[in-house]
Image (tube, rainbow, N blue to C red):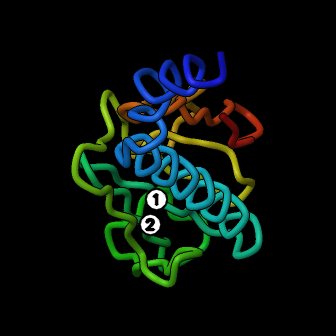
Amino acid sequence: MVIILLGILAVYAAPRMFNSGDFYARGFHDETLALLRYAQKTAIAQRRTVCVTFSSTTATLTMASAGGATDCTSGTALTGPNGAPTITARSGVSYSATTNFNFDGLGQPIAATGGTAMATQTIQISNASNVIVEAQTGYVHD
């Protein structure tokens, strides 16, 4: 009986346990969560706009050079919690259907252009759960 159970585990469970893509996706999800929380808290602490820019495999932070600015065109790179202004996904992990946005000095998400309030943002990551940024409060969660 024990041998049969071990055989079943070997056939079905073991391949899932050793798929590194799932670990990379979860790790990138956690990095994205930390980066966005850091961006929101920095915007509040510095009372400046922090811009979040996405590509298919990266997310980058920039901080406005002056308080009251609604964009980061003349801003500086903001070093994130990983010691760099950008996080980069490993092979096989990517963002999909993401929209660039900013956090204003109150920590609220605003449009990347124009500075208008935004609806709840959903950041989709392949093979991982979504990261959500709530409208009005800027609360970042999964």
Counting other residues with Cα less than 10 Å from the Cα at mark 1, is it few (<14), some (14-19), or many (20 or more)?
A: many
Q: Amino acid at mark 2?
A: Leu
Q: Quadrant of residue 62?
A: bottom left
Q: Where in the figure is residue 93, as x and y percent of width and height?
A: 30, 44
Q: Is residue 113 visible?
A: no
Q: Is residue 36 visible?
A: yes
Q: Nearer the viewer, residue 67 or 94?
A: 94
> Label 1, on which residue?
51
Q: Amino acid at mark 1?
A: Cys
Q: Which structural element holds mark 1?
A: strand
Q: Residue at x 74, y 54 (%)?
A: 106
> Label 2, on which residue?
61
Callout 1 touching callout 2 (CB < 8 Å): yes
Q: Where in the figure is residue 71, as x and y percent of width and height?
A: 42, 59
**How far apart in space, not on screen, are marks 1 and 2 (Cα)?**
6 Å
Q: Total of numbered circles in the picture?
A: 2
Vertical relation: 83 (above or below) 92: below
Q: Which structural element holds mark 2?
A: strand
Counting other residues with Cα less than 10 Å from the Cα at mark 2, is it few (<14), some (14-19), or many (20 or more)?
A: many
Q: Nearer the viewer, residue 9 or 120?
A: 9
